[in-house]
Amino acid sequence: MDLRSKARTLPGPVDDPSKLPTWNYDGSSTNQALGEDSEVILYPQAIYKDPFRRGNNILVMCDSRTPKGEPIPSNTRYNAAKIFGHSDVVAEEPWFGIEQEYTLLQKDVNWPLGWPIGGYPRPQGPYYCGTGADKAFGRDIVDAHYKACLYAGINISGVNGEVMPGQWEFQVGPCLGISAGDEVWVARYILERITEMAGVVLSFDPKPVPGDWNGAGAHVNYSTKTMRADGGYEEIKKAIEKLGKRHKEHIVAYGEGNERRLTGKHETADMSNFSWGVANRGASVRVGRETEKAKKGYFEDRRPSSNMDPYVVASMIAETTIIWKP
């Protein structure tokens, strides 16, 4: 979750990442390289309009590699691109819709926005999608982020207040393949820039406040071409069965500290057991009523935490449901 950026001036406008030059940064200052060989190379991968500088300015999503062109250990996009480039995955056109939850914290005290310092607000209940100065804390930040993502060209599909006060969610998608990872990461970056301007701390901790409060997740809505076609419900059930067989592998990759969130309470399934159900928000995987009725559509993997890596999670879901043979 350690998002960083630097800026440079180009001779003129560019709208294709392949036309952008590679660049470098000091990897020894980010614990990604040794001081005696510190250069890490930036490879441009995706371009978005810059909502901060505007005009012809752009945001460029890059991955990081060694001077020899090899991915550094933290470069999860590289392996994800291989999976999304697999012929079977390309043929299935996987779509992702990712629900990114996050918590806004008061600076210096690291306590949720709107909460009394050292104390607690009223219990959960009135805050989810709530309205009012005593229920919705930080809406100006949320709306600024929504507008900035729309300007940037990110396929942001909505926002809402979450169950715990001071917690919010934005949704990105539907996105095809690896673009889901690009768009979530850039949307996170834009949000962190806006909270920086507002003097508020952004947290992706999956359980920022212990006790009887909801955690923060990043539910992944997923479908393939076959699932979206007539009769796709059978393919959905086959995919969910595959996910169940690799449950432990997925849980390990679904975010740090997720064991504090996936307890079987607060609209989660217990992380030690895999389950699925129709309209069941206490299951590992939820199938919507509309999907059940239409016998085609998508399902929701509710296990990923708010700090998950969308490159890892999205590519793992695609690999398990499309490529993997039990």
Image (cartoon, rainbow, N blue to C red):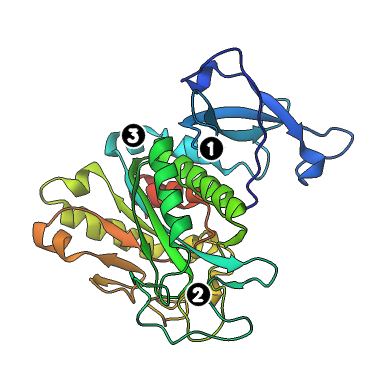
The mark found on residue 90 in the picture is: 3
Which of 230/300 is in front? Answer: 300
Q: Is residue 217 visible?
A: no
Which sits in the foreground, 141 or 271?
Answer: 141
- Distance (Cα) linking label 1 and label 3: 34 Å
Provide residue 136's location: percent of width, then percent of height: 41, 70
Give the alpha-carbon distance from disc 1 to disc 2, as whole Å.
34 Å
Residue type at mark 3 is: Val
Q: Which residue is mark 2?
A: 261
Circle 2: residue type: Arg
145, 314: nearer the viewer: 145
Q: Residue furthest top?
A: 11
Q: Earlier in the sequence, mark 1 or mark 3?
A: 1
Instruction: Give the structural element (helix, strand or loop) at label 3.
Output: helix
Label 2: few (<14), some or many (≥20) within 10 Å? many
Q: Secondary structure at mark 2?
A: loop
- In the image, is 129 to the left or to the right of 32? left
Query: Could you tell me the amino acid type at mark 1?
Result: Phe
Return the residue at label 1: 52
Is the residue 83 above or below the residue 257 in the image? above
Could you say where residue 303 lies in the image, as x and y percent from the top left? 42, 66
Disc 3 versus disc 2: distance between alpha carbons? 33 Å
240 shown above or below 147: below
The image position of residue 66, as x and y in percent, is 71, 31
Compared with 104, 111 (above or below) is below
- Category of crowding for the residue at label 3, using alpha-carbon neighbours closer than 10 angstroms: few (below 14), some (14–19), many (at least 20): some
In the rendering, at what x and y percent does residue 271 appear?
Answer: 46, 74
